[in-house]
Amino acid sequence: MEVRRRFQPRAPAASPSHGGLARRPSAAPAARVQASDALPLPIRHTNLLFSAFFVGSLVFLMRRWREKVRSSIPLHLLGLSEIFAIVGLIASLIYLLSFFGIAFVQSVVSSHDEEDDFLLSGAAPAAPVSSPSPAAICPLLCTDAAAPAPQKNPNITADDEEIISSVVAGKTPSYALESRLGDCRRAAGIRREALKRITGRAFEGLPLDGFDYASILGQCCELPVGYVQLPVGIAGPLLLDGSQHYVPMATTEGCLVASTNRGCKAIAESGGATSVVLRDGMTRAPAVRFPSARRAADLKAFLEEPNNFETIALVFNRSSRFARLQGIHCALAGRNLYMRFSCSTGDAMGMNMVSKGVQNVLDYLEKDFDDMDIISISGNFCSDKKPAAVNWIEGRGKSVVCEAVIKEAVVKKVLKTNIPALVELNMIKNLAGSAVAGSLGGFNAHASNIVSAIYIATGQDPAQNVESSHCITMMEAVNDGKDLHVSVTMPSIEVGTVGGGTQLASQSACLDLLGVKGASLDTPGANARRLASVVAGAVLAGELSLLSALAAGQLVKSHMKYNRSTKDLSKSAS
Ligand code: ADP
């Protein structure tokens, strides 16, 4: 962290570029007024004069008082010269205090300002000691003169007005609006109006109406004030395992849907792709600590004993009728033990389910291992939403391989390149290039583009894009070099068709389009596994198309066409 000198002279107030936070006027040194500014003499001379006056009066009075003490004259009997000396002493003291004292106080105060500015312009403070009310923060936030004053909302009733004022004043907590009002749409509207007044920002482009706020309550999002609109494009049909899928992709990256669509076309014209789900298990790894590494190893041995596993599985599986414990992978770091529980979760992505099962087991183990200290239900060996070799090697969620054989004619006609160029590019870029980069599961061209777009459209957790995008893309010439064998291997696709954001109207509609909405009635987990296969199939299409564009040197050209808005739709369509 940068260290600043405390009494450094400060630069003039900058334009409010730090996230729109303007400096307070007192921060400008040019505007600082001192007592001496009112005097006719130069400051240095005035200071000298008053200092001499002060010292002279003080010395005179001390001498007089010493004489009085010696000759037993009462101190309060004052002569004219003494009265003059006392007045002079007080006057010079007032001057000196006002000059040096105020400057000192200002410097102390302004040093605190400087620290505030440091915090405001850099990272936000981790935890404010006390959270001021929004009204107290308002002067800091609302000083941008360029911000248009928000217009008064004519739809606000007198009742609402009262609650808004209370929220702005910090008397009613914004998070409590839903429970207090019992009306989620009204709560969102009131919160939004309060935010407008606090920030001075109107955020007109963020819609409020047209969304079911009750559907996210207690499940998807807290403190809502509106919703972000994202376009959804359709790539396909993706011919996968003999069925056609129209793949919804929510994205703002031009070219992405078009490119995936082209890959789907190449796959379909070559007879389709096939997929296999190698494993299906969500993981959670709590961290526990023992007094010694030996004791941690005791628990590891206990969990790895097959007879004990049966008991542990019984305890674990009580969490849900869909949760079935598959295995526990233990690792030690000194006297800390990490237990990576893996379980099937039906059609749910399964984080809640596996966490509940793990909690059951920890409660059970505590009885026999009473020196076990539970540090955290998640010890990062899981590993959720962070790049980790354990997911790349062992998998998390669904591990899927998807492959296709693309005919030479299709490579030429649809992908506008040739097989040797694709094979060489894949080797040099996706394999060797990623190895040079020290990549962890990133042996692909842009798997995360497709994964994120499908995740957002279908209500998955987009943060799990980190490990869900682990993918190795392979390309080989087959059938005497006439065809291209292409595959994607993705060990950690974390998807569900029930729970979380999947039940929201738009996301649910996208799942429905894929034919995997909700729980599978025939085989629990079949819908989620199908969705994972579709993700891998779409990634296969995306890889084919992007690598072909790169091999043919078309990437920049096509991005200029689809990523730069010319508003000339006929040109884009052509
Ligand atoms: P997650 O575990 O993915 O975070 P939830 O906590 O919402 O998701 O768990 C899914 C919920 O849906 C559970 O309560 C479970 O009992 C229920 N459920 C209904 N049908 C299924 C199914 N086929 N597979 C998994 N869960 C299901």
Image (spheres, rainbow, N blue to C red):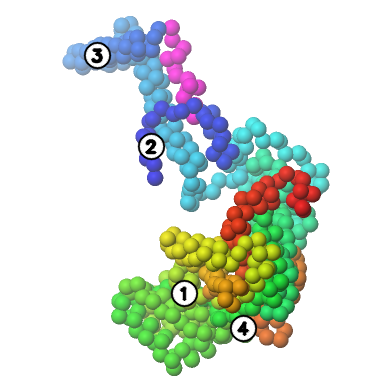
State yes or no: discs 3 and 4 in contact (Cβ < 8 Å): no
Q: How dense is the environment of label 4, judged by Cα within 10 Å: few (below 14), some, or many (20 and up)? A: some
Q: CA distance from mark 2 to mark 4?
A: 57 Å
SS state under label 3: helix
> Looking at the rendered structure, which numbered label has been put on residue 4?
2
Along the viewing direction, whichever of 282 and 178 lies nearer the viewer: 282
Tell me the mark number nearer the camera, choosing from 3 and 2: 2
**Residue labelled 2 has its Cβ within 8 Å of some atom of ligand 1:** no
Determine which residue is flagged by label 4.
322
Give me the C-alpha separation between circle 3 and circle 2.
42 Å
Q: Which residues are magenta?
A: 27-40
Q: Is residue 487 left or right of residue 165?
A: left
Q: Which residue is depicted at the point 35% across and 12% down?
A: 44
Q: Is residue 293 visible?
A: yes
- Badge 2 marks a residue whose secondary structure is loop
| Residue type, label 2 | Arg
Q: Is residue 35 magenta?
A: yes
The amino acid type of the residue labelled 1 equals Ile
Q: Which residue is mark 1?
A: 393
Residue 124 in the image: x percent, y percent?
A: 50, 47
Can you tell which of label 1 and label 3 is closer to the viewer? 1
Q: Is residue 157 left or right of residue 125?
A: right
The residue beneath circle 3 is: 59
Q: Nearer the viewer, residue 573 or 413?
A: 413
Q: Is mark 4 within 8 Å of ligand 1?
A: yes
Would you say residue 559 sits in the magenta stretch? no
